[in-house]
Image (cartoon, rainbow, N blue to C red):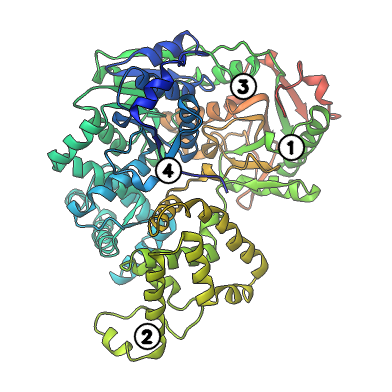
Amino acid sequence: MTEVLSVCFLNLSFELFKSILSIMDILAGLNTKQRQAVETLNGPILVIAGPGSGKTKVLTHRVAYLIQQKVAPENILAVTFTNKASCEMKERIRKLIDSRGSILPARNASRSDAGGPTIGTFHAVCAQILRAEARRIGYRPDFIIYDNKDSLGLIKKCLDETGVSQQQFKPRSIQETISSAKNNLSEPKEYAAQATSYYEETTARIYMVYQDKLKNNNAFDFDDLLMQVVLLLKNTPSVLEKYQKRWQYILVDEYQDTNFAQYALISLLSEKHKNIFVVGDFDQSIYKWRGADFRNILNFEHEHPDCRVIVLEENYRSTQNILAAAAQVISKNLERKDKNLWTNNPTGAPIVLYEALNEKDEGKFIVSEIRKLIAEFKLRLSDFAVLYRTNAQSRAVEEAFLRVGLPYKVVGATKFYDRKEIKDLLAYLRIIHNPNDLLSLERIINVPPRGLRQPPTANQRPILKKLQAWENFNNLLDELRQENKALPLTGLLKLIIEKTKYEDYILGQENGEARLENIEEIFSVTQKFDALPPPDGLGAFLEEAALLQNSDEVETEKNLVNLMTIHCAKGLEFSAVFVVGCEEGIFPHSKSLLDKTQTEEERRLCYVGMTRAKNLLYLSFAEKRLFFGSLITNPPSRFLSEISENIVLVRHSSDKYLSGQEFCETPPEDYS
């Protein structure tokens, strides 16, 4: 499992920071524009950073430079969008400062004397604020965070209890509507007051019941983390002043992907000191569907007339041909600011446009190329990625990989923490941590079978206490809660499995051996939290598990090919990238074809996909394709025609496959 520490602190004393950094040249290795971004100390700063231009380097060196300039480390907040980015930033800063620097656990995030900069995702930082301030809004600090599946399950329960048909009102649609309302900081009563249709009025009813259940369970969903913190800061001046005083220098990565709630959070925190440093690229804004508004970055100069704008245009990742092709595609968008990416990297191989007969031929071609390139350039399977617009496109590619036994992983498919056996054990841990979590109680009350069904109501409990099964179950939970005060997390989990005889139970299920292997794998994660004093390790682990994202599943250590949507690939890079299904109606998506705004988002998505490639880029399309059970014939994507002919090599299924050397100008670099 990929190590994830959602919020990290560098636990070095201020004097040690100063003594180390005084003899280091923090600015070494930066180009002119990067250095300008790092050295500009105060006021609002906008850094437009093209793909592969070293934005993470700028962010990390800026944190170190601020400390060198006698800014107290605890006064620095760096916010990212992914756990991968926050951990990478933490590691780089640690190396810049001192290889012996220790890392405080995430549970100490609320400490004002933590002694180091706060680095984490939006949701992780908000979770830590809520740990410190939960009682102000009627919660206990030991609240749990419901993931997407938990949230959906609770919404289904709300629909059933209110007599609303799940056929007429799809639970996932209700969930998305509530999520959108929260991202716009609209609470249940406010949303109900603005409802104008029967669907909105019904959703408002569900929203109110759903929010009441969350509070009764002492739980937040993912969107609550942001909304509740923003509302708390808005409504409680003393709390706002506390965090404005604490975080006087704020750095934000991927600013183009902020939604309204995230924008409001950063605006509130930076309002007093104005030391706001945002990094982003309007050409890489691809999350409009989940509320992101790239106008936040386009309007930054208007909102901060005194801001300094710095553009990072030197690319360190891709070949000249890949950059040129990507620039030609994105230049067709109107809602953007022009920038000219360039690189000192080699010209590289032309972009391969592959015309497949169908989706099976497309998959066969990908497998053939990967095997050939591995043989010729000694690449590893993890150097390759197959990207697609929608998850449904992975099937044909998977079949091609399975046919020849090529190892692969579909990122964003069944998440590790979504597997039944893992969800069961998490439910035990959550009910131990938070006795109010009825959702978890319902899951494990009869797992393994113990003659119980639904949790009792308040009226039923005095009667059920007389029942031996219920009394035994209650005694088990009480015993485990006591052990949680003394046992490290791994020991607690092993005790749960032992006391419930869960191993015997899971071996009796379908695919029992494989499920048991998953349980054994979770111990490699829990061991990271054993150093924390009980019961802090349990709380930190549950928070990390809830905040995991699809991108955290990408395997770079294991030798396999990663298959994923382009959205999942954001922020990643691979030596060779295959973008499949480049056909009108698929990419760009059919829903975007009549909407100029959506078409521009699709073009940005294509730009992101293309710029994941370091050395080799393949764009494929099919004459016909079996898609969602229908045989379709669509013309090649408009994005392909926007690339100059002189930097592409068109290949067909009828061609004799060329060897890598015939189309690769220079062997790819650094494949070890």
Frontmost residue, 621 versus 252: 252
10 relative to 316, above or below: below
Disc on the earlier residue, 1 or 2:
1
Q: Which mark is residue 6?
A: 4
Q: Is residue 23 left or right of residue 44?
A: right
Marks 4 and 2, how far apart at CA: 38 Å
Quadrant where the image shows the C terminus: top right
Q: Residue 301's quadrant in the figure?
A: top left
Q: Is residue 158 left or right of residue 172?
A: left
Name the kind of residue labelled 1 in the image.
Ile
Disc on the earlier residue, 3 or 2:
2
Disc on the earlier residue, 3 or 4:
4
Marks 4 and 1, how far apart at CA: 35 Å
Name the kind of residue labelled 2 in the image.
Glu
Name the kind of residue labelled 3 in the image.
Ser
Residue that numbered label 2 is attached to: 471
Q: Secondary structure at mark 1?
A: helix
Which residue shows up at 44% across the image and 12% down it?
A: 35
Residue that numbered label 1 is attached to: 366
Q: Residues within 10 Å of mark 2 (few under 14, many from 20)?
A: few
226 relative to 618, above or below: below
